[in-house]
Image: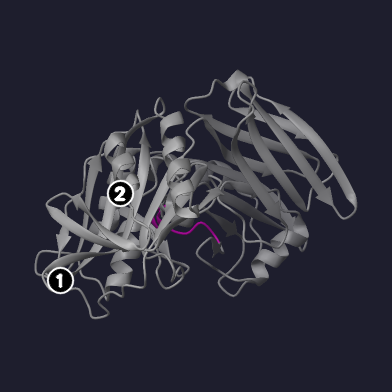
Amino acid sequence: MSYHQRLIEEAIHRIEERKRSYGSVLVKSAIMKREEIWANIVTKILALHFSDVHTPGEKIDYGDFAIVEEVVSLDSLIEMIRNFPEKGSTTIAVGDYHIQIAGEYLANGYKYDSGVDYLNVGWFFERYHYRSPSQGYPSEPLVSPTLPLFPDARTAIDMHLGIDLSRYSDHYGVLICLPRYGAKVEEVNIGSKEVKVKIQSKDEKIGNIVGKLYCQRGVETKQAYIEFTHETGNAFIGFQPESFYLALISKVSGEILDTRRFYRGWELPRGIIVDIPEYGISELIRGGETDGVEFKEDIGKPEEFAETVVAFANCRGGVILLGVDDHASVVGLAGRDYEGTITNILRSHCEPPVQYKIDKRQLDEKSIIFLRIEEGKDKPYTVRGKGPYVRANATDRVATRYELDEFYREKQSGYRP
C-alpha cells in the first residue's frame, strides 16, 4: 500500500471513529476559471460537530475567480477522499460549481491544538493535505458593484478561508480538518506559584477529564495532576514556570483531547494568560502600543474608552494600561475609584457584556491600572449608539460589513471560520 493510500485509509478511519461526534461537513473553495473550467486553488474542509448548524454563505463570483461554500454529508466527504488519485485529477461539486482538482498525493495527518491560529479551527484537530502543484491566483484587484472589494485574490482567500497563501505557499490543493470535539483548553492562567486551567467540554464528561502538566523554570521542574469537577482546575507549582506542556486526557479512552505549550519569550498563544510582574509591565510599555496593547493617560471620554475595549473583545483580546501616556511614559493615576468607573462604563456602553479583569499595580512608585480584555465568545461586540469596533495596527476602527458577516457566521456555526 502506498503512502498516499495509507493516509486515505487513515483519514477515513478518523472520520468513522468520530461519526457520533460529527454532523455535517463545511466545504469552502477558492477557484479560478481556466479555459472555461473551474480549477481549484485551495479548498478547506471542516467536519462540524453534530450540534453546529451552518448555513452556507453567499458565493462571491468575479467571473474568473470565485469563493464558494457548501455543507455536505460525512459520506460525501468519505467518497471525496477515496476519489483523490495519486498524481492525477478529480472533480468535486461545491454548490453549482464543478471544480477540477489536480493532485499529487495525500500527506501529513499532523496534529494541532485548539490554541493555534492556523486554519482557525478552534479545537484540537488533525490536518490532511491533498497537495496540488502551485496554481497561482489573480493578482489584480477584485472589483464588482455588488461584491466586496479586495486588492487581490490572496486577500480574499485569507479572509474567507483563513489561509494566507503568502505565508503558506505550499497550501494549494485540499486541506481536510478533522477536529476532536471531546474537550479543549479555554484558558491557562500562569500565576507566580499556581497554574489555573479552564476547559470547555462537548462530548467528554467533565469528571472523565484529567490534566497532566509539566513545568520548568531553569533547571527546576514540576509535574502536576489536575482534576476537574467543573470547568476549572488548578495546580500548585511553587514557582512561575518559564515553559510548560499541558495535556487534557480522557480517563475512559486514554486519548489526548487537547494540548498546550508555552515558552517565555514566545508570542502568547490564544488563551494563555501570564500574571505579569512589575518588570514585565515595564517591558510591555517599552514595546509600545500594538494590536494587543493600548496606553491611556486617563479614562477620558467613556465612549472612546469603550471603543478600545470592544475592539479588543472583537479581535484577540488585549491590555489597556491606564496611567501611561501616548509617549510610553508612566504618569500614574490620582486616587479616584477607577475600578468602579471602568465597571460602570463597560456595563453601560458595551453590548453584549465583555469579559475583563482589573488589576491595580505600582510602577515607578506610581499607581496604574492593568486592564485585561478577553477575546469575546459572542461577537460582534458593540458600543451602544456607535456600533462595532475592531483593532487594527494599534488603533480602533469601525468594523466593515464583511467583518460583521464573518462574526455572524462564526456565531451561527459555533466555530472560528
Residue 36 placement (x, y as % from top left): 10, 70
Query: Extreme bottom residue here?
Result: 140
Q: Secondary structure at mark 2?
A: loop
Q: Secondary structure at mark 1?
A: loop
Q: Is residue 303 magenta?
A: yes
Q: Dot 1 corresponds to which residue? A: 64
Q: CA gap, disc 1 to disc 2?
A: 26 Å
Please indicate, yes or no, whether residue 78 appears anywhere in the rendered image: yes
Left or right of 130, for residue 3: right
Residue 388 placement (x, y as % from top left): 32, 53
Task: Select label 1 or label 2 by which is in front.
Answer: 2
Point out the tag, 1 or 2, that comes first from the N-terminus: 1
Identify the residue at horizontal 90%, vertical 53% (top origin): 219
**Which sits in the foreground, 168 or 232?**
168
Left or right of 109, for residue 58: left
The disc labelled 2 sits on which kind of residue?
Asn
Left or right of 200, for residue 247: right
Residue 137 placement (x, y as % from top left): 28, 74
**Which sits in the foreground, 40 or 30?**
40
Q: Dot 2 corresponds to which residue? A: 83
Q: Main secondary structure of the magenta part?
A: helix
Q: Is residue 48 above or below residue 299?
A: above
* Cβ atoms at labels 1 and 2 below 8 Å apart: no
Identify the residue at horizontal 84%, vertical 52% (top origin): 217
For label 2, the crowd category at 10 Å Cα-Cα, with few meaning under 14, some 14 to 19 and many 20 or more, is some
Residue 208 placement (x, y as % from top left): 61, 20
Magenta stretch?
298-307
Rendered image: mark on residue 141? none
Please indicate, yes or no, whether residue 379 appears anywhere in the rendered image: no
